[in-house]
Image (spheres, rainbow, N blue to C red):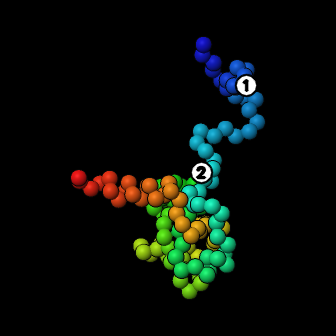
Amino acid sequence: MLFENAFVLTNQSLLPFDEVSEPVYVIPPTLSFSLRGTGKPLSVDAVLESYRLWVEPITSDTDLSGKLRGWYSVYDKRLVQNEFGNRFYIATYGSKWLANKTRSKKAQKEIFLKKYSSRAL
């Protein structure tokens, strides 16, 4: 049976498109993807007292997040920077990025696969 111009709900009832009052998302809304850090993020004070941190960018772009995620060093108690020169300023902590002392197991696995999957055995 084909239903046109209506959503079929889990209880098998129909909801016509013109009666939908809320947005319907084809993809998850912005920031609906979880961050990959481990545990509770560090406080700003703990970030400033650290030398090296695992940084998780806050973005809905999973590709960008994957490229910017990683180990960063704290410079001048003003910013964190990775070995490629990518920077996050301390003033944007909590809105653009979060930090942990260690990386998640999922991130460890992704890095391992990226590093070794392209090598010939």
**For residue 91, which quarter of the picture?**
bottom right
Q: Between marks 1 and 2, how big is the CA–CA gap?
A: 28 Å
Residue reaching furthest to the left? 121
Q: Position of 108 compared to 5: left or right?
A: left
Where's residue 80, x and y in %? 54, 77
Query: Sequence-wise, which precedes: disc 1 or disc 2?
Result: 1
Where's residue 70, x and y in %? 48, 66
Q: Secondary structure at mark 2?
A: loop
Q: Quadrant of the N terminus?
A: top right
Pointers 1 and 2 in contact (CB under 8 A)? no
Where's residue 119, x and y in %? 27, 56
Q: Residue at x 60, y 16 (%)?
A: 2
Vertical comparison of 102 with 48: above or below: above
Which residue is label 2 attached to? 33
Which residue is label 1 attached to? 15
Q: Residue at x 67, y 23 (%)?
A: 8
Q: Secondary structure at mark 1?
A: strand
Circle 2 crowding by C-alpha within 10 Å: few under 14, some 14–19, many from 20:
few
Residue reaching furthest to the bottom? 76
**For residue 38, which quarter of the picture?**
bottom right
Which of discs 1 and 2 lies nearer the camera? The answer is: 2
